[in-house]
Amino acid sequence: MNKYLAPRIQTVGRKKFPVMYETKLSKDWKTMFRLDALRAIRKQKFDMEETKDGYWYLDCGFVLKRKNQDCNNFFKIMIDALIGVAIKDDKNIMPRVQWLNKDTKHPKTVVRLHKAGEFDYKL
């Protein structure tokens, strides 16, 4: 999702300022992802209230359309889509890429949200 944000010029009085806005492509992807997440949450009986405490891993696997596509660009839009659906707030979510593949005809994203363990040692 390299086209998550796009620039445009906003006029305030006589001055023009560049601002970033969320693209239609991004909004459409977020809606599709949110609906898929809702189906999975209901099926698994996941309780969003649990995510307000502690830290949570968002483990992701990607099947990308192109070889040079950057999967890290998906994290912001994915986490934004999960707020209010699977997570209370994104401040305690730690996204991680677990695997990558390429398939031009069947791209997909696989996610697993689970509580992070405690460290075995003190810092």
Image (tube, helix red, strand yellow):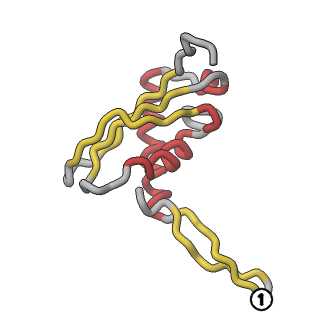
Q: Quadrant of residue 16?
A: bottom right
Depth order, front residue of 114/88: 114
- Extreme front residue here? 123
* Residue 75 position in % (x across, y down): 48, 45
Question: What residue sits right under mark 1 in the picture?
Answer: 14
Instruction: Give the secondary structure at mark 1.
Output: loop
Q: What amino acid is labelled 1 in the image?
A: Arg
Against 45, is 7 above or below?
below
Where does the image place residue 40, in percent across and percent down from the top left?
42, 30
Residue lying at 48% horizontally and 60% vertically, measured from the top left: 4
**Is 42 located above or below residue 6 in the figure?**
above
Q: Which quadrant would residue 122 be assigned to in this image?
A: top right
Q: Residue 95 location in percent, x, y?
A: 48, 36
Q: Residue at x 38, y 48 (%)?
A: 71
**Label 1: how many Cα within 10 Å (few below 14, some 14–19, many 20+):** few
Asked if residue 48 lies left or right of residue 66, the reply is right
Residue at (53%, 33%) from the top-left corner? 94
Q: Position of residue 14 (x, y in %)?
A: 77, 89
